Amino acid sequence: MHKISTLRFTFLLLSAMTITLNGNAQSNKGLISPSNATINNAANKQKVESQNQENAKKWLIKTIETNFNKDTYEMSDMTTKTYAQYKSDAINIEYDNGLTEESFKKKWKSKFDTKYVGMNGFLVPTQDYGKIKVSSCKLLYVIKDKGFVFETIIKDLTFKTSYKRDIKVIPSGKSFLIADVKEY
């Protein structure tokens, strides 16, 4: 009799443990462990970063093609104030009221790599150009202030000329602005 009671007790104990374990397993369904939460946050952050990158790329292509295919455009509508001042100084180096090349470099060397400024026009170095198209725009890298640098090929379809530019684009409000251009 004692054997049957011990066997029955063991069976009841094992049954209770199984029910408890199964119940806990089911109650834990849908809960996110701390490691999963970290993975999900990283994935969401990556998704947002990829979307921002894609938005910046689309903005850059559209801005170049729209503005350069109009009769006139304002560089300052597409760029930061600092970059617009920098590029204006570079364009005016050879003119009477402009800086000398040496004073230009001294003024801007702490903010820009002046050897890549290009002393001619903004993005397209000729005064007369035809239909402009961005033929390539590839992400080179992401910068710490949440900006992006794109290797961009700008084509003048009319005059069959291409210009390679590394263009830094930064967020500005709900849009973007060009913050630097390396001309090659």
Image: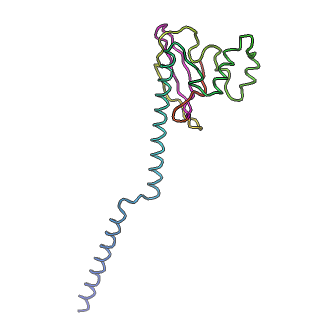
Q: Which secondary structure type mostly characterizes the magenta part of the structure?
A: strand
Query: Where is 43 relative to 167, above or below?
Result: below
Query: Where is 70 relative to 79, above or below?
Result: above
Q: Residue at x 46, y 56 (%)?
A: 35
x and y percentages locating residue 167 in the rendered image: 56, 25
Query: Where is 47 relative to 183, above or below?
Result: below
Q: How is the image coloured?
A: rainbow
**Quarter of the rendering containing residue 105:** top right
Query: Where is 9 relative to 41, above or below?
Result: below
Please provide the residue range marked out in magenta. Answer: 147-172
Q: Residue at x 67, y 26 (%)?
A: 112
- Report whether 85 appears left or right of 153: right
Q: Nearer the viewer, residue 125 or 127?
A: 127
- Quadrant of the snapshot with the C terminus: top right
On whether residue 9 falls in the magenta region, the answer is: no
Q: Residue at x 66, y 19 (%)?
A: 88
Q: Residue furthest bottom?
A: 1
x and y percentages locating residue 90 in the rendered image: 68, 17
Q: Nearer the viewer, residue 105 or 19?
A: 105
